[in-house]
Amino acid sequence: MFGFSARSISNVLFWVTRKKWLILSFLLSISFFYVPSPEGLTPEGHRTLIIVSVALILIISESIPLPAVAILILIMEVILGVDTADGVASSFMSDAVFFIMGSLMLAVALVNQGLDKRLALFVINVTGNKTWRIVLGFVTISAFLSSFIGEHTVAAMLLPVALALIRNAGLSTNKATRLSTLLLFSIAYGCAIGSIGTPSGGGRNVIMIGYLSEFGMGTISYLDWMKFAYPMLIIEIPIVAAVLWYTFTPEQKIMDSSVRKLKVKVAKTGKLTANQIMAIIIFLFVFFGWIFLSPFIGLGIVALSGVFLYLSFGLIEWQDINRNTNWGVILLFGSAISLGIQMKETGAALWIAEQTLFYLDLIFQDVGIVRWFVSVIVTGLLTNLLSNAATVAVLGPIILDMGGEPIIMAIMTSIASAFAYLTVVASPTCMIIHSTGLITSGDYFKAGWKLFIISVLLLLIISTFYWPMLL
Amino acid sequence: MKILIAISSKEYSGPTLDVGMNIARVLNASTTIVDVGQKISEFSMKDVSLANELMDTWDIDRPGVDVLEWAYNYLSENKFIEEQSIKDGFPKNLLIESGSGRAEVLLKGTALENLSLILRNGDIIKELRDEVDTKKYDLTIIGGSGKRSMAHDMIQYIDSSIFIVNNFNKKVDYKILLAVDDSPGTARAVKYGVRVAQAFNIKVDLITISKDGHLGKEYKKASKKAAKMMRRSGVEAKQNFEIGDPVDTIIETAGDNHIIIMGASTQSPITKFFMGSKPLNVMEGSNCPILIVK
């Protein structure tokens, strides 16, 4: 046909079926381009929204590689005349991107130190051998650690510990049991509730802080953030443990031999090495840097200083960092933040905010409820479809343009974006436990919906009664 | 001759591996067994591999290794690999990363010259297509998945002959149902028919179907030629002539105690995409193993 071989036609067909979302987004963007701008929306704002919809379709469908989506956003921003090439470039890099880059690198450096065995020993020594205490221990340690370092680091380090316990209990690490589901979820959900605790708990917190200062809406220090968010984290720990326990109650109420075997195994690793001590010292330096120095030099620069120290003390090879850092994600967040800034500057964010307020006000009859609904419910649901940081990058500018106290709105959105309980793609931790093959997509819903509702209510109570005392 | 056998789990892939290895033995084909693990979202790919690296230091197998280990045990029980290597157990540490998301172990075969086990991760159709395109397999063997659309995509996009081991049951006395007409694909289908019949030591029903109620000379000649070839190879074959719709007739005759073998459609990929093809329709309607020869 037309001189093409059957094989090449088949190749084209294959491409078309695999890339249908790319083609759809292309067609959509062309047709949106020719729709006249609605009243109140600038032509630049109109075109920015085209980019937003293309980016959302491509990120959710994953029909092209994520770095390609990132690059496409930058190209479209320039070609559609939203900003100049230099303007796009400068909105692409910010302290928030530095932070995401630094924290991904720190994760690699920390994971490489072999501290996971120490962590295992610590958890087991504290919890003892009762299964419910182990679950509570996993949730607690995941939550505390991931409130300071990236949740993916914590999940990666704790996953082998959980699997070792499961294997030592005489169960296969390839076949799902209630025990395996319970232990793995206590890591994933522990990390999720932990990531709200401090600005460095997740890239999205830093993105939100970045928006606040970029848009001149206010600043919030590391410790102030903790005052807002940490109480919620602490209240959620027993709740998560209890909900998981009653949803996936295991047959094994005591894991005596399992714990003993783990202790024997870990004991073989000996005392802390000089390198491990050094690694911990550097990490403490980073931690205190975040608390005391970040108001002056930014969270990102502190994280990068840590990476600098790890590299220059030879605690990690650059090759390891290079191989295990997800550069694609860094590119994507850079682009998403750039898009967020353009949404603000072109007035697109304000336009969507006004439309949402207008229409939702017809339903709820109260502007406060509308703001709450968008910043908590919409963010919480979108975070389960998109990744949580991408959700905040896109929704952040809109929510900040809806009025209300900016700092409250910012923290509320960041916290709601941690309600990533319902799907595999919601957060890296969900994907990590899913990758073991022990957790099916259906499992996320079983306990997830309960936690989602409880978290929403808890956030409502805390933001109504506790936060006003802080302002 | 190169064969690719796609497995997914101990629970469901037993028949596929069994059928595949028996065919590989008769064809003396160099054989690769692949397990395609689940797709990992790109957001988390590095985080997952970081976790997997740590799991290695705890001697915990990464997902998929257990499936390969199971396949390895099957191969050693059935004497497909040398005794020397059996004693050592499954050589997990020889699982070598070769390219993005592809890891491979080469085994010393006895019955076969080359035998390897590989692990890939991602969208199954895309991974199998990549594998077949780069390594040029002649035959891909895969279990009948619950998802019809997957078998459909396999036939549409994978550039090798395809054997879908659908509802295979060892207790059933299978016969081969070989569709014969005057198309060029028939000759290749007959060759495979002989091999499969030899592999399982079973009989062949040749079926020639006329749509318009009239059996042309060419059809009769083709059927006779096929029967002759079967006889020469020592395979018992019976000629059948039917009138009716080819797809319905094949599905009806096959029931659930035949292995259907037919040539791939020669229509253009676009026609196949929109209109379907005979092999696709037979595959969708039938309830038994089917081999489509390209």
Image (tube, grey):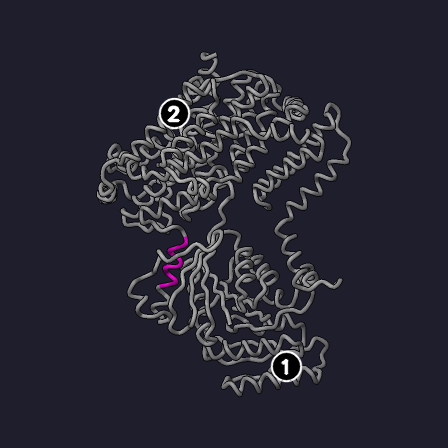
Q: In which quarter of the image is residue A190?
A: top left
Mark 1 crowd level (few <14, some 14–19, many ≥20, 10 Å Cα): some
Q: Residue at x 39, y 59 (%)?
A: B68
Residue under label 2: A287
Amino acid type shown at disc 1:
Phe
Q: Position of residue A226 (x, y in %)?
A: 42, 20
Magenta span: B64-72
Position of A24 with respect to A102 (left or right) is right
Distance Cα–Cα, label 1 vs label 2: 82 Å
Q: Where is residue A414 in the image (x, y as percent from the top left)?
A: 50, 26
Q: In this view of the protein, can residue A462 be seen by the observer?
A: no
Element under disc 2: helix
Tag nearer the camera, 1 or 2: 2
Image mark 1: chain: B
Residue under label 1: B241
- From the viewer's side, name the closer residue of A373 and A117: A117
Amino acid type shown at disc 2:
Phe
Give the numbered dot on residue A469. Answer: none
Mark 2 crowd level (few <14, some 14–19, many ≥20, 10 Å Cα): many
